[in-house]
């Protein structure tokens, strides 16, 4: 069965965007020489899942589409025609991912936003979460994990690493690591 991972950055107080839906706070840890393990992770990905607001934010940067060459699904409530970058789907994210995980393929990457991440984590479909904590307090904005999460979910620490920029990266699994 395919694995689903979340690889995401948030402020120390748990926001993935500020109250203006801006990601500018991430610039404080930007380093041309350091990608925080993203490239080696992303090389294993063949499918990307994102919410519509995340897609719109990516497109607003005026840069080449970040997930070009990957099978990309955008969850939306309002149907939109597919384009060369993504397939827009109105399917229930939980049911869609359950089916997707059964189809042979590589790693599935959930690139946000908070609503999609929360739904998939709550449904226990996420196998690993890599959270890069950015040394900023935003106070308000878009939370990584929405308030409607259904109950407590135990996670198991795989690793933690700190970087000179002040970023701290935590890697968790959704199930215990059992030694062979």
Image (cartoon, grey):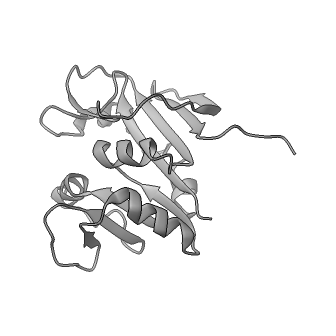
Expressed as whole percent of the image width and height from the top left, the position of residue 140 reads 20, 24
The answer to whether residue 42 is seen in the rendering is: yes
Instruction: Decide: is 104 above or below 141.
Output: below
> Residue sitting at 58 percent across and 40 percent down?
174
Q: Is residue 176 left or right of residue 10?
A: right
Q: Quadrant of the C terminus?
A: top right
Name the residue located 31 percent from the left edge and 60 percent from the top edge.
92
Residue at the image point whose x is 51% and y is 26% from the top: 164
* Quadrant where the image shows the N terminus: bottom right
Is residue 46 something that shows in the picture? no
**In this image, 143 relative to 99: left or right?**
left
Whether 103 is drawn above or below 101: the answer is: below
Q: Residue at x 55, y 54 (%)?
A: 41
Q: Nearer the viewer, residue 123 or 174?
A: 123
| 56 vs 73: above or below | above
* Front residue of 91 and 22: 91
Residue 122, relative to residue 63: is it above or below?
above
Q: Position of residue 71 (x, y in %)?
A: 41, 73
């Amino acid at each position: 069965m395919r694995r689903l991972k979340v690889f995401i950055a948030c402020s120390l107080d748990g926001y993935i965007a500020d109250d203006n839906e801006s990601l500018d706070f991430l610039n404080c840890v930007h380093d041309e020489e350091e990608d925080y393990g993203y490239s080696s992770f992303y090389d294993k990905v063949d499918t990307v899942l994102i919410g519509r607001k995340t897609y719109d934010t990516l497109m607003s940067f005026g840069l080449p589409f970040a997930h070009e060459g990957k099978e990309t699904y955008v969850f939306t409530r309002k149907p939109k025609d597919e384009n060369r970058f993504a397939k827009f789907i109105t399917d229930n994210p939980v049911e869609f991912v359950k089916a997707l995980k059964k189809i042979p393929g590589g790693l599935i990457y959930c690139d946000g936003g908070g609503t999609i991440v929360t739904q998939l984590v709550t449904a226990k479909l996420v196998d690993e979460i890599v959270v890069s904590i950015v040394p900023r307090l935003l106070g308000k904005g878009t939370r990584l994990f929405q308030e409607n999460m259904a109950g407590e979910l135990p996670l198991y620490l795989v690793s933690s690493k700190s970087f000179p920029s002040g970023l701290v990266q935590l890697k968790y699994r959704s199930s215990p690591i059992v030694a062979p």
